[in-house]
Image (cartoon, rainbow, N blue to C red):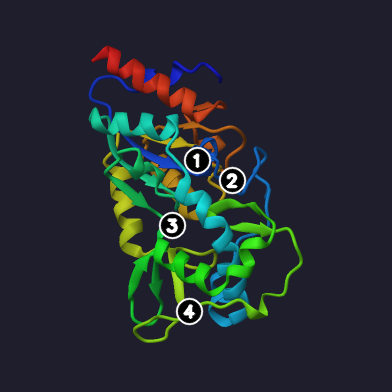
Amino acid sequence: MTDHRALATWFTPGVRAAVITGAGISTASGIAAYRGSDGSWKHAAPVQMQDFLRDPAMRRRYWARSLLGWPLIAAARPNAAHRALARLEAAGRLRGLITQNVDGLHQRAGHSDVIELHGSLGSVMCLACDWTCARAEMQAWLTEDNPWLLEVRATAAPDGDAALADRIDLARFRVRACPVCAGVLKPTVVFYGDSVPRARVDDAYARVESADVLLVAGSSLMVFSSFRFCRHAHARGIPIIAVNDGVTRADELFALKLEADCGVVLSVLADTLAAAG
């Protein structure tokens, strides 16, 4: 369906939704998505956790690309979809928001109750001693130690990554170790091949179970870490409604699906519910 008003029919008085958001929420803020509307990869597959742990060259590759990609994330601003969801939260129409995104844009829009399923790019942690710092501090170190890389051409990629347009040897790229214990530093995100912390998963399940409806916005649900919540809702008879431009892994589970722009549809929803009081 493309009727932007159809979503509001599910929000009768007293109905509150749990929300799952994905990369499609943030594309209007200039952040690329991994997948196209058909669910296939648009960019190179992201770094795998085991590769990051075992291979210093992989860590240099990750941080070199992140040095060039992070400024886009840092400068990104919430769009109409983020602001509409924050309005719905403020109006008491949500049971919580579960996001697959690591860009922090929901919080920048004023949303307070956010479960960051895959963590946040905004901070860095030591894998040995759990020391942490702001990503901006890591950026300052990377820039200070590798000024030559700033001249390299790159194009933006998802999740603060950047595709290096030039063939360069990263053997001389320097990545600092933890200043406390000399351990390996990693962004506080869940890499592919890693697991979402159990407490975070349980928290997300609890939000879904307490909701009257589950709203999926801007996610293809191709990764199991988010798809499982749709299966959980469906098994418990909780209606699932979706706004996504393209196919999803859960299409057969939806009570309603709008293939439309998230910002437009969610803004119409927030306006309609505000007008209805």
Instruction: From the image, state whether disc 2 or disc 4 is nearer to you.
Output: 4
Q: Which mark is residue 26?
A: 1
User: Which of 132/167 is in front?
Assistant: 167
Visible in this render: residue 195?
Answer: no
Q: Which mark is residue 118?
A: 3
Label 2 sits on residue: 33
Which badge, 1 or 3, comes first in the chain's sequence? Answer: 1
Visible in this render: residue 194?
Answer: yes
Residue in the image at 26% along x and 41% along y: 210
Q: Which mark is residue 186?
A: none
Label 4 sits on residue: 176
Answer left or right for 17 relative to 182: left
User: Which amino acid, by three-letter code, is at mark 4?
Assistant: Arg
Residue in the image at 59% along x and 81% along y: 56
Q: Look at the numbered discs 2 and 1 and tell me whether their residues touch, using CB distance below 8 Å.
A: yes
User: Distance from label 4 to label 3 (Cα)?
Assistant: 24 Å
